[in-house]
Image (cartoon, rainbow, N blue to C red):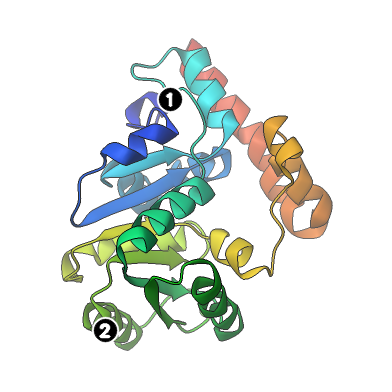
Amino acid sequence: MRLRDLKLLKQRKDLETLPDGKLLINTVNAFSFTKVQVDSLFAESLTKCDVLLPDGWSVVWACRFLNVDDKPLERTAGWDLFEYEMDKLNRKGGKVMFMGSSEKVLSLIRGNVAKFYPNMSVETYSPPYKPEFSEEDNRAIIQAINQANPDLLWIGMTAPKQEKWIYSKWDKLNIHCHCGSIGAVFDFFAGTAKRAPKIWQDMYVEWLYRLLLEPSRMWRRYIIGNAKFIWLVLKEKFA
């Protein structure tokens, strides 16, 4: 897959133009772009979703370097999507559902929804913690989502598991709302993980902040992963 094969949201304000109804929204960053090269289902989940956000300045810069058509003008992170959709739903009232993560994290999320978004109700579902769900697991998750019938649905598992799961089960979900795969945002909103301060974000080194906080977990993603991403971009440029 090439970067020019991806149809990316151009800028944050374009979130305001998204149509109502059932809509699948995913994100892509340097790490996930390297993963799609060896995972066809993950690649399909990004190319065939309804909206794809450039969640990383490296993707934005690479698209400029490659001079792709309709290149994004700025980064639109999963957190940007989360804030926009939550504020929008809170203004009119409705139900939000969080599927993913642990009961501990989901309990904190429920408390924060009540605190910061008082005009909406919240439902949560914590799936089994395992590399792959069984058919029974999948049926239970789908049933929980369909019974909840939310006005906004968030999926929070690790990439690419979350994107592949929601894409492969999309036709079985009888929902009428926007659905976003937002991973780490669950922890950011719950307060169990700390997002980089704005000054790090403005300097485009949010990835470095996360690396310094969790070097043993993040070094492979950001050091090896970023090197692979640069190689893929150069390969696409000069092939």
Secondary structure of the residue carrying numbered label 2:
helix
* Relative height, residue 128 to residue 182 (above, below): below
**Mark 1 neighbour class, 10 Å CA radius: few under 14, some 14 to 19, many 20 or more:** many
Camera-side mark, 2 or 1:
1
Residue in view at x 80 percent, y 58 percent: 216
Residue 115, image x, y percentages: 55, 73
Q: Residue 24: percent from the left, percent from the top?
A: 28, 53
Q: Nearer the viewer, residue 101 or 37?
A: 101
Residue on which the image places disc 1: 72
Closer to the camera in the image, 11 or 67: 11
Residue 117 in picture, x, y percent from top left: 47, 67
Element type where label 1 sits in the image: loop
- Residue 73 drawn above or below residue 27: above
Mark 2 or mark 1, earlier in chain: 1
Look at label 1 and name its amino acid.
Answer: Pro
- State whether residue 164 appears in this view: no
Q: Position of residue 91 (x, y in %)?
A: 35, 59
Q: Which residue is mark 2?
A: 139
Q: Quadrant of the N terminus?
A: top left
Could you say which is closer to the camera, residue 206 or residue 68? 206
Residue name at image x 26 percent, y 44 percent: 48
Q: What amino acid type is highlighted by mark number 2?
A: Arg
| Residue at the image point whose x is 46% and y is 22% from the top | 73
How many other residues sit within 10 Å of disc 2, few (<14), some (14-19) or many (≥20)? few
